[in-house]
Amino acid sequence: MSDTNSHDITATTEWTALTEHAAEVEPRHLRSLFDDDPDRAGALTVTGADLVLDYSKHRITRDTVGLLTDLARAAGLPARTEAMFTGAHVNTSEDRAVLHTALRLPRDASLTVDGQDVVADVHAVLDRMGEFTDAVRSGAWTGSTGRRIRTVVNIGIGGSDLGPVMAYEALRDYAQRDLECRFVSNIDPTDLYEKTRDLDPATTLFVVSSKTFTTQETLTNARNARSWLLSGLGTDDTGAVAKHFAAVSTNAEKVSEFGISTDNMFGFWDWVGGRYSLDSAIGLSLMCAIGREHFAEFLAGMHAMDEHFRHTPLEQNLPVISGLLGVWYANFFGADTRAVLPYSQYLHRLPAYLQQLTMESNGKSVRGDGTPVTTTTGEIFWGEPGTNGQHAFYQLLHQGTRLVPCDFIGFARPHHDLPGEDAADSHDLFMANLFAQSAALAFGKTAAEIEAEGTPADVVPHKVMPGNRPSSTILAEKLTPSVLGQIIAFYEHVTFVEGTIWGIDSFDQWGVELGKVMAKQFGPALHDPNPPDAGLDASTAALVGRYRAWRGR
Ligand code: F6P
Protein backbone atom coordinates (compact mmCIF):
# COMPACT_ATOMS: atom_id res chain seq x y z
CA MET A 1 0.00 0.00 0.00
CA SER A 2 1.66 3.21 -1.03
CA ASP A 3 0.55 6.79 -0.66
CA THR A 4 1.98 9.26 -3.13
CA ASN A 5 1.96 12.80 -1.82
CA SER A 6 1.97 14.68 -5.09
CA HIS A 7 -0.79 17.27 -5.29
CA ASP A 8 -0.13 20.80 -6.49
CA ILE A 9 -1.27 22.66 -3.41
CA THR A 10 -0.87 26.03 -5.11
CA ALA A 11 -3.57 25.12 -7.62
CA THR A 12 -6.27 24.71 -4.96
CA THR A 13 -8.99 27.23 -4.15
CA GLU A 14 -7.86 27.03 -0.53
CA TRP A 15 -4.45 28.34 -1.56
CA THR A 16 -6.03 31.18 -3.49
CA ALA A 17 -8.19 32.06 -0.49
CA LEU A 18 -5.09 32.19 1.70
CA THR A 19 -3.25 34.38 -0.81
CA GLU A 20 -6.10 36.91 -0.70
CA HIS A 21 -6.36 36.67 3.08
CA ALA A 22 -2.60 37.17 3.52
CA ALA A 23 -2.83 40.40 1.53
CA GLU A 24 -5.40 41.66 4.06
CA VAL A 25 -3.48 40.53 7.14
CA GLU A 26 -0.01 41.57 6.05
CA PRO A 27 -0.45 45.34 6.65
CA ARG A 28 -1.92 44.79 10.11
CA HIS A 29 0.21 45.16 13.24
CA LEU A 30 0.06 42.76 16.16
CA ARG A 31 -0.77 45.77 18.33
CA SER A 32 -4.02 46.32 16.47
CA LEU A 33 -4.74 42.61 16.20
CA PHE A 34 -4.64 42.40 20.01
CA ASP A 35 -6.58 45.65 20.46
CA ASP A 36 -9.33 44.46 18.13
CA ASP A 37 -9.70 41.04 19.71
CA PRO A 38 -9.33 41.21 23.49
CA ASP A 39 -9.89 37.45 23.91
CA ARG A 40 -7.24 36.62 21.37
CA ALA A 41 -4.63 35.31 23.80
CA GLY A 42 -7.00 32.70 25.22
CA ALA A 43 -8.53 31.82 21.89
CA LEU A 44 -5.19 31.25 20.21
CA THR A 45 -3.73 29.02 22.90
CA VAL A 46 -4.00 25.23 22.74
CA THR A 47 -2.83 22.40 24.95
CA GLY A 48 -1.74 18.90 24.06
CA ALA A 49 -0.38 16.30 26.50
CA ASP A 50 1.67 18.48 28.91
CA LEU A 51 2.50 21.24 26.44
CA VAL A 52 0.86 24.62 26.07
CA LEU A 53 1.20 26.44 22.75
CA ASP A 54 0.37 30.14 22.73
CA TYR A 55 0.27 31.21 19.10
CA SER A 56 -1.56 34.48 19.65
CA LYS A 57 1.57 36.51 18.84
CA HIS A 58 1.37 35.47 15.19
CA ARG A 59 0.35 37.67 12.32
CA ILE A 60 -2.98 35.99 11.89
CA THR A 61 -6.63 36.57 12.67
CA ARG A 62 -9.00 33.93 13.89
CA ASP A 63 -10.08 33.48 10.26
CA THR A 64 -6.54 32.52 9.31
CA VAL A 65 -6.75 29.37 11.40
CA GLY A 66 -9.85 28.19 9.52
CA LEU A 67 -8.30 28.95 6.15
CA LEU A 68 -5.10 27.13 7.04
CA THR A 69 -6.93 24.06 8.30
CA ASP A 70 -9.01 24.10 5.10
CA LEU A 71 -5.68 23.95 3.26
CA ALA A 72 -4.60 21.01 5.39
CA ARG A 73 -7.80 19.18 4.49
CA ALA A 74 -7.31 20.01 0.81
CA ALA A 75 -3.85 18.43 1.07
CA GLY A 76 -5.41 15.31 2.58
CA LEU A 77 -3.65 15.70 5.92
CA PRO A 78 -6.08 13.64 8.05
CA ALA A 79 -6.01 10.66 5.68
CA ARG A 80 -2.25 10.83 5.23
CA THR A 81 -1.73 10.99 8.99
CA GLU A 82 -3.78 7.83 9.35
CA ALA A 83 -1.85 6.24 6.49
CA MET A 84 1.45 6.97 8.25
CA PHE A 85 0.30 5.67 11.63
CA THR A 86 -1.05 2.45 10.14
CA GLY A 87 2.02 1.57 8.12
CA ALA A 88 1.22 2.66 4.55
CA HIS A 89 4.33 3.23 2.47
CA VAL A 90 4.23 7.02 2.72
CA ASN A 91 7.96 7.08 1.92
CA THR A 92 7.23 6.41 -1.72
CA SER A 93 10.63 7.00 -3.30
CA GLU A 94 12.03 4.22 -1.09
CA ASP A 95 8.73 2.28 -0.96
CA ARG A 96 8.79 2.12 2.84
CA ALA A 97 6.42 2.46 5.73
CA VAL A 98 7.22 5.32 8.13
CA LEU A 99 6.58 4.04 11.60
CA HIS A 100 8.66 5.89 14.16
CA THR A 101 5.35 6.28 16.00
CA ALA A 102 5.28 2.48 16.45
CA LEU A 103 8.52 2.67 18.44
CA ARG A 104 6.65 4.28 21.31
CA LEU A 105 3.47 2.22 21.27
CA PRO A 106 2.73 0.69 24.66
CA ARG A 107 3.39 -3.02 25.09
CA ASP A 108 -0.32 -3.91 24.98
CA ALA A 109 -1.00 -2.02 21.72
CA SER A 110 -1.23 -3.89 18.49
CA LEU A 111 0.01 -3.03 15.03
CA THR A 112 0.71 -5.51 12.27
CA VAL A 113 2.49 -4.13 9.25
CA ASP A 114 3.44 -6.07 6.15
CA GLY A 115 2.53 -9.24 8.10
CA GLN A 116 4.77 -8.45 11.08
CA ASP A 117 3.71 -7.81 14.70
CA VAL A 118 5.57 -4.54 15.04
CA VAL A 119 4.79 -3.90 18.72
CA ALA A 120 6.15 -7.29 19.81
CA ASP A 121 9.34 -6.69 17.81
CA VAL A 122 9.82 -3.22 19.28
CA HIS A 123 9.38 -4.37 22.88
CA ALA A 124 11.65 -7.38 22.40
CA VAL A 125 14.47 -4.97 21.46
CA LEU A 126 13.56 -2.55 24.27
CA ASP A 127 13.74 -5.45 26.77
CA ARG A 128 17.20 -6.45 25.52
CA MET A 129 18.34 -2.84 25.68
CA GLY A 130 17.01 -2.68 29.23
CA GLU A 131 18.97 -5.77 30.30
CA PHE A 132 22.13 -4.52 28.67
CA THR A 133 21.92 -1.01 30.09
CA ASP A 134 21.01 -2.32 33.56
CA ALA A 135 24.22 -4.35 33.46
CA VAL A 136 26.32 -1.40 32.31
CA ARG A 137 24.80 0.97 34.87
CA SER A 138 25.12 -1.43 37.78
CA GLY A 139 28.67 -2.45 36.96
CA ALA A 140 27.65 -6.06 36.27
CA TRP A 141 28.92 -5.56 32.73
CA THR A 142 32.69 -5.33 32.93
CA GLY A 143 35.37 -4.63 30.37
CA SER A 144 37.96 -7.20 29.33
CA THR A 145 40.09 -6.54 32.42
CA GLY A 146 37.15 -6.96 34.79
CA ARG A 147 36.63 -3.26 35.54
CA ARG A 148 33.26 -1.58 35.34
CA ILE A 149 32.38 0.80 32.51
CA ARG A 150 32.68 4.51 33.33
CA THR A 151 32.30 6.05 29.88
CA VAL A 152 30.00 5.17 27.01
CA VAL A 153 31.16 6.60 23.68
CA ASN A 154 28.50 6.66 21.00
CA ILE A 155 29.94 6.65 17.48
CA GLY A 156 27.41 7.71 14.87
CA ILE A 157 26.47 10.66 12.70
CA GLY A 158 23.30 12.42 11.57
CA GLY A 159 20.30 10.72 13.08
CA SER A 160 22.58 8.23 14.81
CA ASP A 161 24.20 11.07 16.77
CA LEU A 162 22.15 14.25 16.89
CA GLY A 163 19.17 12.70 18.68
CA PRO A 164 21.14 10.80 21.32
CA VAL A 165 23.46 13.71 22.12
CA MET A 166 20.61 16.22 22.24
CA ALA A 167 18.53 14.04 24.55
CA TYR A 168 21.53 13.11 26.73
CA GLU A 169 22.27 16.79 27.25
CA ALA A 170 18.60 17.56 27.84
CA LEU A 171 18.16 14.83 30.44
CA ARG A 172 21.46 15.12 32.28
CA ASP A 173 19.61 15.70 35.49
CA TYR A 174 18.06 12.22 35.12
CA ALA A 175 21.35 10.52 34.28
CA GLN A 176 23.55 8.33 36.45
CA ARG A 177 26.27 10.87 37.11
CA ASP A 178 29.13 8.41 37.51
CA LEU A 179 28.59 7.08 34.00
CA GLU A 180 29.49 9.62 31.37
CA CYS A 181 28.38 9.54 27.74
CA ARG A 182 30.39 11.08 24.94
CA PHE A 183 29.51 11.35 21.28
CA VAL A 184 31.88 11.05 18.34
CA SER A 185 30.42 11.92 14.96
CA ASN A 186 32.81 13.85 12.75
CA ILE A 187 35.23 12.02 10.47
CA ASP A 188 37.65 14.81 11.42
CA PRO A 189 40.12 12.68 13.45
CA THR A 190 40.25 15.36 16.14
CA ASP A 191 36.75 14.42 17.24
CA LEU A 192 37.69 10.89 18.26
CA TYR A 193 41.02 12.12 19.61
CA GLU A 194 39.51 14.75 21.88
CA LYS A 195 36.71 12.47 23.10
CA THR A 196 39.07 9.63 24.02
CA ARG A 197 42.36 11.34 24.98
CA ASP A 198 41.66 11.22 28.73
CA LEU A 199 39.77 7.92 28.80
CA ASP A 200 40.91 4.59 30.13
CA PRO A 201 40.21 1.90 27.51
CA ALA A 202 39.59 -0.63 30.30
CA THR A 203 36.53 1.33 31.45
CA THR A 204 35.24 2.51 28.06
CA LEU A 205 32.38 1.05 26.07
CA PHE A 206 31.82 2.07 22.45
CA VAL A 207 28.34 1.97 20.96
CA VAL A 208 28.61 2.05 17.18
CA SER A 209 25.31 3.43 15.93
CA SER A 210 24.54 3.28 12.25
CA LYS A 211 21.31 2.30 10.60
CA THR A 212 23.07 1.13 7.45
CA PHE A 213 26.46 0.29 8.99
CA THR A 214 28.01 1.59 5.78
CA THR A 215 28.43 5.26 6.68
CA GLN A 216 32.02 6.31 5.98
CA GLU A 217 32.37 8.60 9.00
CA THR A 218 31.04 6.08 11.49
CA LEU A 219 32.95 3.09 10.20
CA THR A 220 36.19 5.06 10.01
CA ASN A 221 35.74 6.28 13.59
CA ALA A 222 34.74 2.80 14.75
CA ARG A 223 37.86 1.24 13.20
CA ASN A 224 40.07 3.92 14.78
CA ALA A 225 38.32 3.41 18.12
CA ARG A 226 38.97 -0.32 17.92
CA SER A 227 42.68 0.32 17.29
CA TRP A 228 42.76 2.83 20.17
CA LEU A 229 41.15 0.24 22.45
CA LEU A 230 43.41 -2.67 21.53
CA SER A 231 46.60 -0.64 21.67
CA GLY A 232 45.51 0.96 24.96
CA LEU A 233 44.77 -2.43 26.47
CA GLY A 234 48.05 -3.73 25.07
CA THR A 235 46.41 -6.69 23.40
CA ASP A 236 45.70 -7.93 19.94
CA ASP A 237 43.01 -10.22 21.32
CA THR A 238 39.97 -9.22 19.33
CA GLY A 239 37.94 -10.96 22.07
CA ALA A 240 38.36 -7.70 23.99
CA VAL A 241 36.20 -6.05 21.35
CA ALA A 242 33.22 -8.09 22.54
CA LYS A 243 33.47 -6.52 26.01
CA HIS A 244 33.99 -2.97 24.77
CA PHE A 245 31.86 -2.67 21.65
CA ALA A 246 28.12 -2.80 21.07
CA ALA A 247 26.35 -1.99 17.82
CA VAL A 248 23.00 -0.52 16.88
CA SER A 249 21.98 -1.17 13.31
CA THR A 250 19.51 -2.68 10.88
CA ASN A 251 22.39 -4.47 9.16
CA ALA A 252 23.45 -7.58 11.14
CA GLU A 253 25.70 -8.82 8.35
CA LYS A 254 27.83 -5.67 8.30
CA VAL A 255 27.99 -5.60 12.11
CA SER A 256 29.41 -9.16 12.18
CA GLU A 257 31.77 -8.32 9.35
CA PHE A 258 33.12 -5.45 11.48
CA GLY A 259 33.82 -7.91 14.30
CA ILE A 260 31.08 -6.98 16.78
CA SER A 261 29.19 -9.98 18.10
CA THR A 262 25.51 -9.93 17.20
CA ASP A 263 24.93 -10.75 20.90
CA ASN A 264 25.89 -7.11 21.50
CA MET A 265 23.82 -5.85 18.60
CA PHE A 266 20.50 -4.07 18.93
CA GLY A 267 18.39 -3.91 15.82
CA PHE A 268 15.73 -1.76 14.31
CA TRP A 269 13.90 -1.67 11.02
CA ASP A 270 13.93 0.01 7.63
CA TRP A 271 10.66 1.75 8.52
CA VAL A 272 12.56 3.94 10.99
CA GLY A 273 14.20 6.89 9.23
CA GLY A 274 17.62 7.95 10.57
CA ARG A 275 16.40 11.34 11.78
CA TYR A 276 13.38 9.70 13.42
CA SER A 277 15.38 6.99 15.19
CA LEU A 278 16.25 8.38 18.62
CA ASP A 279 13.42 6.33 20.14
CA SER A 280 14.70 3.10 18.55
CA ALA A 281 17.81 1.20 19.68
CA ILE A 282 19.71 4.30 18.48
CA GLY A 283 18.78 5.59 21.93
CA LEU A 284 20.99 2.91 23.57
CA SER A 285 23.58 5.38 24.87
CA LEU A 286 20.76 7.58 26.20
CA MET A 287 19.25 4.58 27.96
CA CYS A 288 22.67 3.80 29.45
CA ALA A 289 22.66 7.31 30.87
CA ILE A 290 19.09 7.68 32.13
CA GLY A 291 18.07 4.05 32.67
CA ARG A 292 15.23 2.05 31.26
CA GLU A 293 12.47 3.60 33.42
CA HIS A 294 13.26 7.15 32.35
CA PHE A 295 13.62 5.95 28.77
CA ALA A 296 10.15 4.42 29.04
CA GLU A 297 8.82 7.78 30.30
CA PHE A 298 10.47 9.47 27.35
CA LEU A 299 8.74 7.05 24.95
CA ALA A 300 5.43 7.53 26.77
CA GLY A 301 5.76 11.29 26.26
CA MET A 302 6.28 10.81 22.55
CA HIS A 303 3.28 8.50 22.42
CA ALA A 304 1.13 11.06 24.26
CA MET A 305 1.97 13.65 21.57
CA ASP A 306 1.31 11.04 18.85
CA GLU A 307 -2.14 10.44 20.28
CA HIS A 308 -2.79 14.16 20.46
CA PHE A 309 -1.69 14.64 16.86
CA ARG A 310 -3.63 11.67 15.54
CA HIS A 311 -6.92 12.27 17.32
CA THR A 312 -7.29 16.01 17.99
CA PRO A 313 -9.27 18.22 15.58
CA LEU A 314 -6.95 20.21 13.35
CA GLU A 315 -7.97 23.53 14.91
CA GLN A 316 -6.83 22.38 18.38
CA ASN A 317 -3.86 20.34 17.26
CA LEU A 318 -0.42 21.62 18.31
CA PRO A 319 1.75 20.15 15.54
CA VAL A 320 -0.89 20.98 12.92
CA ILE A 321 -1.10 24.61 14.00
CA SER A 322 2.67 25.02 14.22
CA GLY A 323 3.22 23.30 10.86
CA LEU A 324 0.54 25.41 9.17
CA LEU A 325 2.09 28.57 10.60
CA GLY A 326 5.37 27.46 9.05
CA VAL A 327 3.60 27.22 5.69
CA TRP A 328 1.88 30.59 6.29
CA TYR A 329 5.15 32.44 6.74
CA ALA A 330 7.22 30.49 4.19
CA ASN A 331 4.68 30.71 1.40
CA PHE A 332 2.62 33.82 2.07
CA PHE A 333 5.09 36.12 3.86
CA GLY A 334 8.35 35.03 2.22
CA ALA A 335 10.04 34.02 5.48
CA ASP A 336 13.01 31.70 4.99
CA THR A 337 13.78 30.61 8.51
CA ARG A 338 12.34 29.71 11.89
CA ALA A 339 14.38 30.38 15.02
CA VAL A 340 14.05 27.87 17.84
CA LEU A 341 14.87 29.51 21.15
CA PRO A 342 14.77 27.12 24.08
CA TYR A 343 15.01 28.86 27.44
CA SER A 344 16.76 25.87 28.94
CA GLN A 345 20.48 25.30 28.85
CA TYR A 346 19.69 21.59 28.92
CA LEU A 347 18.18 22.01 25.43
CA HIS A 348 21.26 23.58 23.92
CA ARG A 349 21.50 20.92 21.21
CA LEU A 350 17.81 21.04 20.27
CA PRO A 351 18.25 23.48 17.35
CA ALA A 352 21.02 21.29 15.84
CA TYR A 353 18.82 18.23 16.20
CA LEU A 354 15.88 20.03 14.60
CA GLN A 355 18.02 21.10 11.67
CA GLN A 356 18.40 17.52 10.54
CA LEU A 357 14.86 16.54 11.43
CA THR A 358 13.23 19.34 9.49
CA MET A 359 15.72 20.22 6.75
CA GLU A 360 16.71 16.71 5.70
CA SER A 361 12.99 15.96 5.65
CA ASN A 362 11.58 18.95 3.83
CA GLY A 363 14.48 20.29 1.78
CA LYS A 364 12.97 18.96 -1.45
CA SER A 365 12.17 20.45 -4.86
CA VAL A 366 10.02 17.71 -6.32
CA ARG A 367 6.74 16.28 -5.19
CA GLY A 368 6.02 12.66 -4.37
CA ASP A 369 5.50 11.83 -8.05
CA GLY A 370 8.75 13.52 -9.13
CA THR A 371 7.14 16.65 -10.60
CA PRO A 372 8.63 20.00 -9.54
CA VAL A 373 7.07 21.83 -6.62
CA THR A 374 5.50 25.18 -7.44
CA THR A 375 6.22 26.97 -4.19
CA THR A 376 8.91 27.32 -1.54
CA THR A 377 9.45 24.28 0.67
CA GLY A 378 11.57 23.61 3.74
CA GLU A 379 11.95 26.08 6.56
CA ILE A 380 15.53 26.75 7.66
CA PHE A 381 15.61 25.91 11.35
CA TRP A 382 18.26 27.46 13.53
CA GLY A 383 18.69 28.84 17.03
CA GLU A 384 20.46 28.91 20.35
CA PRO A 385 19.25 28.75 23.90
CA GLY A 386 18.09 31.91 25.59
CA THR A 387 19.44 34.01 27.07
CA ASN A 388 22.71 33.47 25.18
CA GLY A 389 21.08 34.17 21.82
CA GLN A 390 19.85 37.52 23.13
CA HIS A 391 23.46 38.69 23.23
CA ALA A 392 24.20 37.38 19.77
CA PHE A 393 21.56 37.50 17.03
CA TYR A 394 18.39 38.92 18.63
CA GLN A 395 19.33 42.37 17.34
CA LEU A 396 18.49 41.16 13.85
CA LEU A 397 15.28 39.56 15.09
CA HIS A 398 14.14 42.86 16.63
CA GLN A 399 15.30 45.49 14.17
CA GLY A 400 16.58 43.71 11.06
CA THR A 401 14.82 43.71 7.71
CA ARG A 402 14.03 40.00 7.71
CA LEU A 403 10.98 38.28 9.07
CA VAL A 404 12.03 35.46 11.38
CA PRO A 405 9.18 33.65 13.14
CA CYS A 406 10.40 32.25 16.47
CA ASP A 407 9.53 29.33 18.71
CA PHE A 408 10.19 30.17 22.35
CA ILE A 409 10.30 27.12 24.62
CA GLY A 410 10.30 27.44 28.40
CA PHE A 411 9.60 25.64 31.65
CA ALA A 412 8.07 26.81 34.91
CA ARG A 413 10.06 24.70 37.34
CA PRO A 414 13.83 24.81 37.61
CA HIS A 415 15.88 21.68 38.16
CA HIS A 416 18.17 23.04 40.81
CA ASP A 417 18.15 25.44 43.69
CA LEU A 418 21.49 27.16 43.78
CA PRO A 419 22.80 28.31 47.15
CA GLY A 420 22.61 31.94 48.18
CA GLU A 421 19.87 34.55 48.43
CA ASP A 422 20.37 35.94 44.94
CA ALA A 423 19.98 32.51 43.41
CA ALA A 424 16.43 32.05 44.69
CA ASP A 425 14.92 34.17 41.92
CA SER A 426 17.30 33.13 39.16
CA HIS A 427 14.80 31.01 37.32
CA ASP A 428 12.16 33.77 37.46
CA LEU A 429 14.67 36.18 36.03
CA PHE A 430 15.54 33.69 33.32
CA MET A 431 11.92 33.16 32.33
CA ALA A 432 11.19 36.89 32.54
CA ASN A 433 13.62 37.19 29.65
CA LEU A 434 11.62 34.72 27.56
CA PHE A 435 8.35 36.54 28.20
CA ALA A 436 9.99 39.93 27.61
CA GLN A 437 11.57 38.92 24.32
CA SER A 438 8.40 37.53 22.78
CA ALA A 439 6.45 40.62 23.90
CA ALA A 440 9.12 43.02 22.61
CA LEU A 441 9.19 41.23 19.28
CA ALA A 442 5.42 41.39 18.97
CA PHE A 443 4.66 44.88 20.20
CA GLY A 444 7.93 46.80 19.90
CA LYS A 445 8.25 50.42 20.92
CA THR A 446 7.07 53.38 18.86
CA ALA A 447 8.94 56.57 17.97
CA ALA A 448 6.43 58.53 20.09
CA GLU A 449 7.19 56.38 23.14
CA ILE A 450 10.90 56.81 22.61
CA GLU A 451 10.61 60.58 22.10
CA ALA A 452 8.57 60.84 25.28
CA GLU A 453 11.59 59.46 27.17
CA GLY A 454 13.59 62.52 26.06
CA THR A 455 15.67 60.71 23.44
CA PRO A 456 17.42 63.12 21.04
CA ALA A 457 15.59 63.30 17.71
CA ASP A 458 18.51 61.95 15.69
CA VAL A 459 18.73 58.86 17.88
CA VAL A 460 15.02 58.09 17.87
CA PRO A 461 14.97 56.13 14.58
CA HIS A 462 17.77 53.92 15.86
CA LYS A 463 15.81 53.04 18.95
CA VAL A 464 12.45 52.36 17.31
CA MET A 465 11.43 48.77 17.84
CA PRO A 466 9.07 48.00 14.98
CA GLY A 467 7.44 44.96 16.59
CA ASN A 468 5.00 42.85 14.56
CA ARG A 469 7.52 40.02 14.71
CA PRO A 470 5.74 36.75 15.26
CA SER A 471 6.44 33.99 17.73
CA SER A 472 4.98 30.91 19.35
CA THR A 473 5.53 30.21 23.01
CA ILE A 474 5.64 26.58 24.07
CA LEU A 475 5.46 26.11 27.81
CA ALA A 476 5.57 23.07 30.05
CA GLU A 477 5.79 22.70 33.80
CA LYS A 478 9.20 21.02 33.80
CA LEU A 479 11.66 19.47 31.37
CA THR A 480 11.10 15.81 32.25
CA PRO A 481 11.86 12.78 30.05
CA SER A 482 8.18 12.69 29.11
CA VAL A 483 8.08 16.39 28.21
CA LEU A 484 11.23 16.05 26.11
CA GLY A 485 9.56 13.17 24.26
CA GLN A 486 6.51 15.36 23.67
CA ILE A 487 8.62 18.20 22.29
CA ILE A 488 10.46 15.89 19.89
CA ALA A 489 7.26 14.20 18.68
CA PHE A 490 5.70 17.65 18.31
CA TYR A 491 8.44 18.73 15.88
CA GLU A 492 8.37 15.40 14.04
CA HIS A 493 4.69 15.98 13.32
CA VAL A 494 5.23 19.65 12.46
CA THR A 495 7.64 18.39 9.80
CA PHE A 496 5.10 15.87 8.54
CA VAL A 497 2.34 18.49 8.36
CA GLU A 498 4.50 20.82 6.29
CA GLY A 499 5.68 18.03 3.97
CA THR A 500 2.10 16.93 3.45
CA ILE A 501 0.97 20.43 2.51
CA TRP A 502 3.85 20.80 0.07
CA GLY A 503 3.16 17.41 -1.50
CA ILE A 504 6.65 16.06 -0.90
CA ASP A 505 8.17 12.89 0.51
CA SER A 506 9.59 14.01 3.86
CA PHE A 507 11.20 10.65 4.53
CA ASP A 508 13.87 10.20 1.88
CA GLN A 509 17.17 12.13 1.62
CA TRP A 510 18.58 11.56 -1.83
CA GLY A 511 20.23 14.98 -1.77
CA VAL A 512 22.97 13.79 0.59
CA GLU A 513 24.13 10.97 -1.67
CA LEU A 514 26.11 12.75 -4.40
CA GLY A 515 28.54 14.39 -1.98
CA LYS A 516 29.22 11.04 -0.30
CA VAL A 517 30.03 9.37 -3.63
CA MET A 518 32.25 12.26 -4.74
CA ALA A 519 34.18 12.28 -1.44
CA LYS A 520 35.08 8.62 -2.03
CA GLN A 521 36.02 9.41 -5.61
CA PHE A 522 38.17 12.43 -4.61
CA GLY A 523 40.05 10.61 -1.81
CA PRO A 524 42.96 9.30 -3.92
CA ALA A 525 43.49 12.71 -5.53
CA LEU A 526 44.51 14.01 -2.08
CA HIS A 527 47.24 11.49 -1.35
CA ASP A 528 48.06 9.01 -4.14
CA PRO A 529 51.40 9.68 -5.87
CA ASN A 530 49.74 8.97 -9.23
CA PRO A 531 46.04 9.45 -8.59
CA PRO A 532 43.53 8.19 -11.11
CA ASP A 533 41.61 10.92 -12.88
CA ALA A 534 38.92 11.86 -10.34
CA GLY A 535 37.25 14.19 -12.82
CA LEU A 536 37.98 17.28 -10.73
CA ASP A 537 36.68 20.60 -12.05
CA ALA A 538 39.21 23.43 -12.44
CA SER A 539 38.42 25.10 -9.10
CA THR A 540 38.55 21.87 -7.11
CA ALA A 541 41.72 20.71 -8.88
CA ALA A 542 43.47 23.95 -7.89
CA LEU A 543 42.30 23.65 -4.26
CA VAL A 544 43.44 20.05 -4.09
CA GLY A 545 46.80 21.07 -5.60
CA ARG A 546 47.30 23.67 -2.88
CA TYR A 547 46.25 21.14 -0.23
CA ARG A 548 48.75 18.58 -1.54
CA ALA A 549 51.53 21.15 -1.55
CA TRP A 550 50.90 22.01 2.11
CA ARG A 551 50.84 18.32 2.93
CA GLY A 552 54.16 17.88 1.08
CA ARG A 553 52.68 15.51 -1.50
O1 F6P B 1 22.97 12.28 6.21
C1 F6P B 1 22.46 11.18 5.57
C2 F6P B 1 22.11 10.05 6.51
O2 F6P B 1 21.70 8.97 5.75
C3 F6P B 1 21.07 10.43 7.55
O3 F6P B 1 19.78 10.35 7.09
C4 F6P B 1 21.38 9.48 8.64
O4 F6P B 1 20.80 9.87 9.85
C5 F6P B 1 22.89 9.53 8.64
O5 F6P B 1 23.25 9.65 7.28
C6 F6P B 1 23.59 8.37 9.28
O6 F6P B 1 23.27 7.16 8.65
P1 F6P B 1 23.55 5.78 9.36
O7 F6P B 1 22.76 5.72 10.61
O8 F6P B 1 23.11 4.73 8.36
O9 F6P B 1 25.02 5.69 9.64
Image (spheres, rainbow, N blue to C red):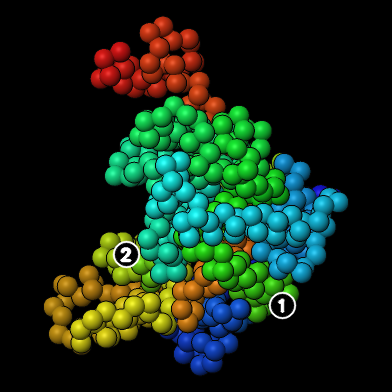
Q: Which residue is drawn at the image coordinates 56% and 43% (left, top)?
A: 247
Estimate the spatial distance between the alpha carbons at disc 1 and disc 2, rounded to whole Å: 35 Å
Vertical comparison of 427 with 268: above or below: below
- Circle 2 is placed at which residue position? 389
Q: Residue 372's x, y, as percent?
A: 67, 43
Q: Residue 109's x, y, as percent?
A: 77, 68
Q: Residue 487's x, y, as percent?
A: 54, 68
Q: Which quadrant of the view contains residue 105?
A: bottom right
In the figure, is residue 179 to the left or right of 330? left
For the C terminus, give its image quadrant.
top left
Q: Which residue is drawn at the image coordinates 65% and 47% (left, top)?
A: 267
Q: Which quadrant of the view contains residue 352?
A: bottom left
Q: Which residue is drawn at the image coordinates 54% and 49% (left, top)?
A: 159
On residue 544, the disc is none
Q: Nearer the viewer, residue 459 or 151?
A: 151
Vertical comparison of 171 with 161: above or below: below
Q: Which residue is drawn at the image coordinates 33% and 45% (left, top)?
A: 199
Local SS, label 1:
loop
Amino acid under label 2?
A: Gly
- Circle 1 is placed at which residue position? 313
**Residue 119 visible within the image:** yes
Q: Nearer the viewer, residue 24 or 553?
A: 553
Q: Which of marks 2 and 1 precedes in the sequence? A: 1
Q: Nearer the viewer, residue 333 or 352?
A: 352
In the figure, is residue 249 to the left or right of 535? right
Amino acid under label 1?
A: Pro
Q: Which quadrant of the view contains residue 196?
A: top left
Vertical comparison of 337 with 547: above or below: below
Q: Residue furthest bottom?
A: 38
Local SS, label 2:
helix
